[in-house]
Image (spheres, rainbow, N blue to C red):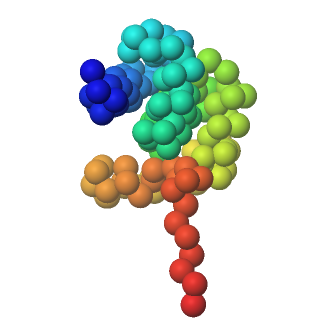
Amino acid sequence: MSSHEHRLRDLVRLRRVRDRIDRDYAQPLDVEALARGANLSAGHLSREFKLAFGESPYGYLMTRRIERAMSLLRRGDLSVTEVCFAVGCSSLGTFSTRFTQLVGISPSAYKKNAAGATDGIPSCVAKQVTRPVRNREVRAVPRS
């Protein structure tokens, strides 16, 4: 098998891992379990996933969880703790810290400020404009 064929096979595996994270974000997932499911070592999965998608599998998982948490918090009918566990986090402290890092404000402040903020906006548009911005995605300010 050529190195090109090997790389393509790895990319297929990595896409399957990413799809599993997207689908099963609320389940207890860790890098070891994801790697086992893709027949890769945890270290290889982490390195290759980051090369392919720009962040670690854990970082990608937490971003998916925070995106879903933002949606649940905007609804306003669940507490921050309920949202934390609904998106698959087992530690309120870790959830709050990661949420604040990605969104810029705490989950409770987000819930207070965002309730009803997307009323009347189609869900496909609301999802895009409320998506958390990862550090690597921050747009550069044009120079004058």
16 to the left or right of 51: left
Please name whichever residue, 131 or 43, is drawn nearer the observer in this view of the structure: 43
Residue 136 visible to an observer of this rendering = yes
89 to the left or right of 45: right
Please name whichever residue, 66 or 49, is drawn nearer the observer in this view of the structure: 49
Residue 3: image x %, image y %? 34, 29
Residue at 48 percent across and 39 percent down: it is 51
In this rendering, the answer to whether 39 lies above or below 43 is: above
Residue at 29 percent across and 27 percent down: it is 2
78 to the left or right of 97: left
In this rendering, the answer to whether 141 lies above or below 35 is: below
Residue at 54 percent across and 17 percent down: it is 42
Please name whichever residue, 19 or 41, is drawn nearer the observer in this view of the structure: 41
Residue 125: image x %, image y %? 31, 56
Quick one: quadrant of the C terminus?
Answer: bottom right
Please name whichever residue, 138 or 85, is drawn nearer the observer in this view of the structure: 138
Residue at 69 percent across and 29 percent down: it is 94
Residue 70 visible to an observer of this rendering = no
Outermost residue, bottom direction? 144
